[in-house]
Structures are given as C-alpha cells and as structure tokens.
Image (cartoon, grey):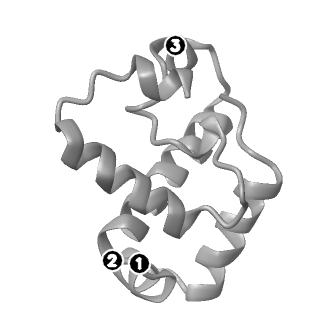
Amino acid sequence: MDTLHQYPWPGNVRELKNLMENLVVSVPSLTIEPHHLPIHVQSRQDTKRARSLKQRLDRFEQQVVMEALSQHGSFRKAAEALGVDHSTLVKKVKRWTENPPIA
C-alpha cells in the first residue's frame, strides 16, 4: 500500500484501474506483493538499490511479461505476442510468485 501511495499516478484513475486489473489477472497468488508491481510504480528507493545484472534483467523481464499480460489479457495471447511458448510464460510467472526477485 505504501508503494502505491508514493506513486504520483500521472494517468490518474485510469492508470490505477488498469494496473489493478493487470495484477488481478497476472498474479496467481491471493496476495499482491510489492515485487509484483511494475518497476515504474515501485518506490524510487527500491529502484535505486544496487542489484546484479541478473537481478536487473529478471526484473525487466518480469515487467515486460506483466505488461504483455495486461495488454493481451491471457497467457496464450501474451506468449504469442512475446514470441515464447505459453508454458514458458506460465512457468516464469509461477517462478516469480514462488521466488520473487530481489527489489
């Protein structure tokens, strides 16, 4: 909640609504954690922390996947748009849910 409160919401209510819809569709767990949020929504402190290249790439990949899920509305359509197999996308999201990337 703190992270959401700190974000300035330049897209106003429409941006918030789209983000919530995306999270509800793409996060398989019952609880939405800060690591599920796109990088641009996370607090500036979290994005400025030093991270390894692997952690940064994983975070970027997660952001791209979540945006694709939001835009296309299903794992199959998002996977097709990203040029990956549907099962690969499902496994990635499951991995991120079980082992969230370090913020």
Instruction: Reply above or below: 40 against 67.
Output: above
In 3D space, how far apart are the residues under numbered discs 3 and 1 (Cα atoms)? 29 Å
Residue named by callout 2: 72
Badge 1 marks a residue whose secondary structure is: helix
Q: Find residue 101 and report its horizontal and vertical position in percent.
A: 71, 41
The residue sitting at 42% across, 17% down in the picture is 6
Q: CA distance from mark 2 to mark 3?
A: 30 Å
**Viewer-nearest of discs 1 and 2:** 2
Callout 1 touching callout 2 (CB < 8 Å): yes
Q: Nearer the viewer, mark 2 or mark 3?
A: 2
5 is higher (above) or lower (below) than 65: above
Looking at the rendered image, the quarter that the C terminus falls into is top right
Instruction: Report the residue marked by disc 1.
Output: 78
Left of 29 or right of it: where is 34? left
The Cα atoms of the two marked residues, 1 and 2, are separated by 5 Å
Q: For label 1, count other residues whose C-alpha is less than 10 Å away and answer few (under 14), some (14-19) or many (20+).
A: many
What amino acid is labelled 1 in the image?
Answer: Ala
Q: Mark 3 — residue?
A: 48
